[in-house]
Image (tube, rainbow, N blue to C red):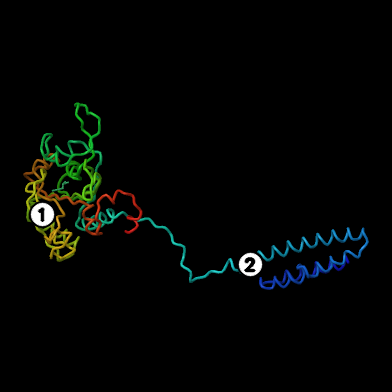
Amino acid sequence: MKNKLQRIREDFLKQLAEIKDPNFLHELEIKYLSRKGELSELMGGLKDLSVDLKKEVGELANSVKKELQEKFNEASKALNNFSGKNNVVDVTLPGTKLERGHLNPITLVQNELEDIFTSLGFMILDGPELESDYYNFTALNVAPNHPARDMQDTFYVDLKNKDGQYDLLMRTQTSPVQVRAMQKYGAPLKALIPGRCFRNEATDARHEHTFYQVEGMLIGKNINFANLKSFLEIVGQKLFGPSTKLRMRPKFFPFVEPGNNGEYTCFLCQGKGCRVCKNTGWLEIVGAGLIHPDVLRAGGIDPEIYSGLAFGFGLNRLAMLKYNINDVRLFNSGDLKFLEQF
Ligand code: DAH
């Protein structure tokens, strides 16, 4: 009986080693390890043996059975891993989607503007969001008690400077970087300044305390109003398409003279009139003008030699028009359902 056990063991291991296809494993299992298999059959004969032999052969048979079962399990695991179900690649299944980040619509519009202006030879500049009262207002021709300050209330930092004045505020516009840039680079100068601005606003669908602007300026010799007009026309055509027209309407901004609002043909209705342009056919997009001599002086540039043009866009408004966004507060909401659409 011991010999028979030995033979079964050897046969089993030999056959197991030869199996390359997991489908044949089952046959082997039935033949040797199942309830009606050779091992069980042999163990069924144990009852006819003497008590001593029964113990000895029984123990041996059990250890062989355990060994064969383990070897079988190992082989079956290896074969299945290699070519079994787990490893089948169904190329028709959709792949696992990689989560990708999204650029904020403001960033998309900003990138577009930066491309347009760098192609026109402008450099892109940055400036501080926590700004001094001087650069944000005074240097831009808005004296401390000037009524124009009322239009741009903001958040002040509760810290007095050495003259006992509250001096630091969150900038209300990107315009302060005009004077900073003039002081740093002098004339001639072509610069585009995108950035975040702040105002003490009661927020609603069209007003927000934190928003984005892009400022632009071009300083050189003999820069005049005709230059401003043709320049804004080019910008409008690059932004909204070649058939875009410009209309300029006078508007007061303390740091330019003369100042105006630039309006472009509504790109949604091609100027026919629609809900977005309030049936006028025009979209108010850009504030602009010729830089006031006092502002040039504050920047250390002689207005007798140089003149310049300046303009400012609201980036949120551009993005709202372009992507049909109806509430400015969505930009700061951190709402992924909103952001994932871009
Ligand atoms: N800073 C102005 C604002 O926030 C926008 C502006 C208007 C900028 C006219 C300019 C400009 O450079 O010339 O309303």
Relative to residue 183, is residue 48 drawn left or right?
right
Residue type at numbered disc 1: Leu
Residue 282: image quadrant is bottom left
Please name whichever residue, 338 or 296, is drawn nearer the observer in this view of the structure.
Answer: 338
Residue 263: image quadrant is bottom left
Q: Position of residue 261 (x, y in %)?
A: 11, 52
Q: Is mark 1 within 8 Å of ligand 1?
A: no
Residue type at numbered disc 2: Asn
Element carrying mark 1: helix
Q: Residue at x 58, y 66 (%)?
A: 86
Q: Position of residue 137 (x, y in %)?
A: 15, 39
Which of labels 1 and 2 is toward the front? 2
The residue to which callout 1 is attached is 228
Locate the N terminus and report the quarter of the image it occupies. Answer: bottom right
Q: Position of residue 186 (x, y in %)?
A: 16, 44
Element carrying mark 2: helix
